[in-house]
Image (spheres, rainbow, N blue to C red):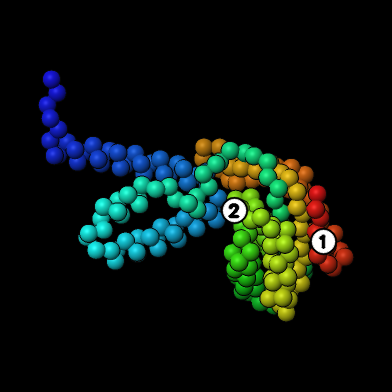
Amino acid sequence: TSRPLSSLDEVRLMQVSFLQMIRNLAEYRNYMPASVLQSSDSSSEMEEEAHATEEPSHSSSRSQSMGAKPQNILQNTEVSVKRVTLLVCNIIDFLQVAAASQDVISKYLSSGIQFLKVTKGIPDTFSGDRLYASWNGVRACASHRSAAYTFTTSIKEDQGKDMKLSIGIVSGDVRCGNMGCDGMKKFSYIGSLSSWVHVVERIGRSMECVVAIDA
């Protein structure tokens, strides 16, 4: 017959379970886009601050709420077909602009991220002076086309005094989801739309206008 668990044994079991949970969470984060993780971390910090002000009598309800699934985390990580809008924003004559102002990239990127938040867009990647964004992929956005147009107008008005921007926008169906390997996963888009958005941006640069395509 097995002997009853002592208090020390229970503590050890809780510690093992807790460490396993931490490892599982760390692995789960590899599947999440950085933008979603930032949103989740911000929400967690706000929740912890709120709980810190609670009275002891609320401890039972707090334990129940901690067991609920976070609502801002992407639950379905399978690759699926979605209708999305992709955007590429590029600084024209970047070397000249950067030479005139060393902090131009910081202002440009901060402005882009701010307007993406307002329009429910996601900053997918930033490389040099090129910002890649999407709507209705990671985060649901029913009016994703008009949201991308609003972003375009906002960032051009905000940054127009310091630089010229070439922007390409494409909307259509793509296969998207978290892809990669165990060590690295990223929310990605598969389909001709991913290539078209670069072509559209180059066309817009040569014509000095914003080009948008609905595939």
Q: Pick the residue in front: 172 or 202.
A: 172
Residue farthest to the right, as pictured: 207
Tell me which residue sits at (71%, 44%) in the image: 174
Amino acid under label 2?
A: Arg
Residue 156 position (above or below residue 33): below
Q: Residue 195's spot in the image, x, y percent?
A: 77, 48
Residue 20 position (above or below residue 50): above
The answer to whether residue 180 shows anywhere in this view is no
Taking the image as shown, residue 28 lies to the left or right of residue 151, namely left
Tell me which residue sits at (69%, 62%) in the image: 147
- Quadrant where the N terminus is found in the figure: top left
Q: Do the residues bearing badges 1 and 2 touch, measured as CB atoms within 8 Å? A: no
The answer to whether residue 158 shows anywhere in this view is yes
* Residue matched to label 1: 211
Q: Residue 204's spot in the image, x, y percent?
A: 83, 62
Residue 18, picture quadrant:
top left
Q: Pick the residue in front: 103 or 189.
A: 189
Q: Residue 215's spot in the image, x, y percent?
A: 81, 49
Task: Give the structural element (helix, strand or loop) at label 2.
Answer: loop
Q: Residue 13's spot in the image, x, y percent?
A: 23, 37
Label 1 vs label 2, nearer the camera: 2
Looking at the image, is mark 1 or mark 2 earlier in the sequence?
Answer: 2
* Residue matched to label 2: 139
Amino acid under label 1?
A: Val
